[in-house]
Image (tube, rainbow, N blue to C red):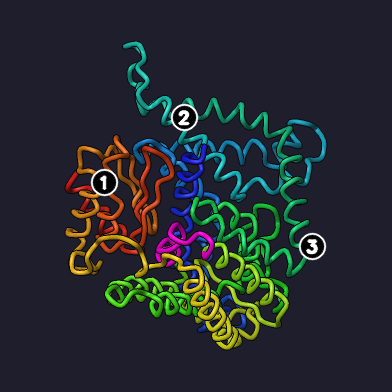
């Protein structure tokens, strides 16, 4: 089950990766015309509409991402099946169709079927499941045209009719429960924001934070913090102070808190390992500051020092709660880095975004002091303090001109290509299936300059490379 959930978490990241370009276009549009959707500026109107085209259709992007990500071989046929399922569900359970079927007024929950991210994820799973099960179906000669992958969409349609019938009775109750959950959390104000921030970080090792984010950022249950902040999905641009609380607190942590913690780790690293630690931590800190992608930093120590990672999650929750109480609001389409901070500054819902910097400096100081104190006092094995026998000169430093070397070392550490049965990657990790877990040499893998290694099961290995993971994956696929 955990392996399945981790794969789902990776699949949810595929559509989320489309958000940066939407954020750039929306942000530039608002910089050109801060008063609205480009009513007096053609360039601003063009950029805003182009950016909103992606975010307004996130449910469809979730269908495609989940269908392909959860299929056995990432085949596009699964995406076609997912779209078939999504179109059927949203049509059969639209308010007009429900009223026609029942002869009465449709429950208000059915008005939230179309464009709902939860429905997108569900139909994506249906498409992937039907593809995995029936992609190799062999039919009699008379029906052979519909054999194999051609049968997938047909089977998906039949399955979707049954699912739609079940949802006809279940959806009002399920949607009501999701709304109640969202309302219960949001009604607690800053405390709820802090709890959300804490669990957001705590779920990162399992890749499930994206599922949690979909509840608070998008329109799955009506909170839609991201949608409302950017004035998308049918929402008018919200007044300053009303939205953005589920995003604001991440900016100080990601822009300055993480670099502060990274500096503490560098200062406490062993003298002979400071150079290697500087390369790893410096790249991770810069990545977090600019883009808000924190995984390269977090995976560098979460398994070596889990207690320290728990402190990191707690600090994130506290900062999120404090920012929710302050007169400051900022929002992002991807993550809380410098780029999104600049782009969101002119949005109508933005409020005192300049305060992120002084708040961030305080957060950086707190992170530095707390991390350095705990690392020294508890002798935590953060980067540069590990008790391993990898000599510094034998380590590889990941750069733009040595992806082949990195891939080669990682593959050797995995026990060679004969021990690898499948290879995939998400935004920051290589995800591999192996035959014999005893052949995996984690020290060898880490000597490739990667941030960390995670082993969810005896047949699964995840190598945390960072945002350049695609290039390493491409080189490994050539070797395999």
Residue 414, numbered label:
1
Magenta-drawn segment: 295-308
Question: SS of the residue at dot 2?
Answer: helix
The one of 35 and 192 positioned closer to us in this rendering: 192
Whether the magenta-drawn stretch holds residue 306 is answered as yes
Q: Which label lies toward us, 1 or 2?
A: 1
* Label 2 packing within 10 angstroms: few (<14), some (14-19), many (20+): many
**Mark number displayed over residue 85:** none
Residue under pointer 2: 130
* Earlier residue among tags 1 and 2: 2
Say few, some or many: other residues with alpha carbon within 10 Å of mark 1 (under 14 / 14 to 19 / 20 or more). many
What numbered label is drawn on residue 187? 3
> Is residue 422 left or right of 409 when viewed as pictured?
right
Q: Is 262 in the magenta?
A: no
In this rendering, would 392 be left or right of 250? left
Mark 1–mark 3 distance (CA, rounded to whole Å): 48 Å
């Amino acid at each position: 089950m955990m392996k399945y959930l981790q794969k789902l978490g990776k699949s949810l990241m595929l559509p989320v990766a489309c958000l940066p370009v939407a954020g750039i276009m929306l942000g530039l549009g608002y910089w050109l015309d801060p008063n609205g959707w480009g009513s007096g500026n053609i360039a601003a109107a063009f950029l805003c509409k182009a950016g909103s085209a992606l975010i307004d259709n996130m449910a469809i992007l979730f269908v495609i991402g989940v269908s392909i990500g959860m299929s056995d071989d990432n085949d596009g046929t699964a995406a076609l099946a997912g779209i078939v399922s999504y179109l059927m569900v949203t049509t059969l359970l639209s308010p007009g169709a429900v009223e026609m079927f029942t002869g009465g007024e449709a429950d208000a929950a059915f008005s939230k079927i179309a464009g709902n991210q939860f429905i997108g994820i569900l139909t994506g799973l249906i498409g992937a499941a039907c593809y995995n099960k029936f992609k190799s179906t062999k039919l009699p000669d008379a029906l052979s045209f519909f054999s194999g992958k051609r049968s997938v969409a047909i089977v998906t349609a039949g399955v979707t009719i049954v699912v739609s019938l079940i949802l006809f009775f279940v959806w009002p109750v399920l949607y009501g429960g999701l709304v109640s959950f969202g309302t219960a959390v949001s009604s607690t104000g800053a405390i709820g924001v802090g709890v959300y921030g804490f669990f957001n970080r705590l779920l990162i090792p399992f890749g499930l934070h994206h599922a949690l984010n979909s509840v608070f950022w998008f329109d799955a249950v009506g909170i839609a913090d991201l949608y409302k902040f950017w004035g998308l999905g049918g929402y008018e641009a919200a007044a300053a102070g009303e939205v953005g609380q589920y995003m604001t607190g991440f900016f100080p942590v990601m822009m300055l808190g993480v670099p502060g913690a990274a500096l503490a780790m560098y200062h406490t690293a062993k003298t002979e390992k400071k150079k290697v630690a500087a390369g790893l931590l410096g790249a991770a800190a810069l990545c977090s500051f600019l883009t808000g992608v924190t995984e390269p930093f977090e995976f560098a120590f979460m398994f070596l020092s889990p207690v320290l990672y728990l402190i990191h999650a707690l600090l994130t929750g506290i900062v999120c709660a404090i920012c929710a109480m302050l007169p400051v609001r900022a929002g992002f389409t991807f993550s809380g880095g410098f780029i999104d901070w600049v782009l969101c500054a002119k949005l109508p819902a933005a409020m005192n975004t300049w305060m992120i910097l002084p708040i961030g400096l305080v957060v950086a100081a707190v992170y530095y002091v707390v991390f350095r104190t705990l690392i020294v006092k508890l002798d935590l094995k953060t980067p540069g303090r590990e008790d391993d026998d990898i000599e510094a000169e034998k380590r590889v430093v990941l750069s733009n001109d040595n992806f082949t070397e990195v891939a080669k070392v990682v593959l050797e550490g995995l026990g060679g290509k004969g021990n690898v049965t499948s290879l995939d990657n998400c935004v920051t990790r290589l995800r591999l299936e192996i035959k014999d877990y005893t052949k995996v040499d984690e020290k060898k893998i880490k000597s490739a300059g990667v941030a960390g290694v995670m082993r969810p099961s005896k047949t699964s290995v995840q190598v945390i490379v960072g945002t350049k993971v695609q290039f390493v994956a491409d080189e490994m696929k050539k070797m395999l």
